[in-house]
Amino acid sequence: MWTDVAIIIAGLVMLAAGIGAIVAKSLLVSIILAGGVSLVASLVFLLIGAPDVAMTEAAIGSGLTTVVFLYALARSKQADKEDSDESAEHPDAEKAGAP
């Protein structure tokens, strides 16, 4: 009985975090919320009696995927910064159309 209630609560938390990830203005917040959805999903798998699936979801879905997304976000911000530094050093390059 209590597991049914816990699963329903976890589902509502996952729904709220998923909607929050979609409507968040910050990519960092979206990545963290998406990782949270996956972590709560692993708890649901544990509650329904599938510990192997729960461990896989926690390791791959919540852990590895979140780290890869954070790495990609950091790399893209670094690339944006490098691009903005180059355009600041050569303001005439944008006007002339040169790369």
Image: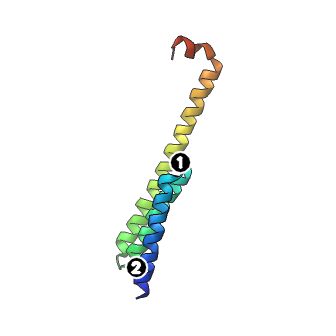
Residue drawn at x 56%, y 48% is 26
- Pick the front one: 71 or 15: 15
- For disc 1, the neighbor class at 10 Å (few under 14, some 14 to 19, many from 20) is some
The circle on residue 27 is 1
Q: In the displayed structure, would residue 19 be above or below residue 70?
A: below
Q: Residue furthest right?
A: 89
- Pick the front one: 37 or 25: 25
Q: Secondary structure at mark 1?
A: helix
Amino acid found under the numbered disc labelled 1: Leu
Q: In the displayed structure, would residue 76 be above or below residue 36?
A: above
Residue 33: horizontal and vertical position, in percent?
51, 59
Residue 13: horizontal and vertical position, in percent?
48, 69
Q: In the displayed structure, would residue 8 be above or below residue 93?
A: below
Q: Quadrant of residue 96?
A: top right
Q: Secondary structure at mark 2?
A: helix
Residue drawn at x 40%, y 79% is 47
Q: Quadrant of residue 80?
A: top right
| Image quadrant containing the N terminus | bottom left
The circle on residue 44 is none
Disc tally is 2
Q: Residue furthest top?
A: 96
Amino acid found under the numbered disc labelled 2: Leu
What is the spatial separation of the Cα atoms under label 2 and label 1, in whole angstroms?
30 Å
Q: How is the image coloured?
A: rainbow
Q: Of label 2 and label 1, which has the lower sequence position? A: 1
Write down the residue under mark 2: 47
Depth check, mark 2 against mark 1: the one in front is: 1
- For disc 2, the neighbor class at 10 Å (few under 14, some 14 to 19, many from 20) is some
Q: Residue furthest bottom?
A: 1
Tags 2 and 1 in contact by the CB under 8 Å rule? Answer: no
Residue 9: horizontal and vertical position, in percent?
46, 76
Q: Quadrant of residue 14?
A: bottom left
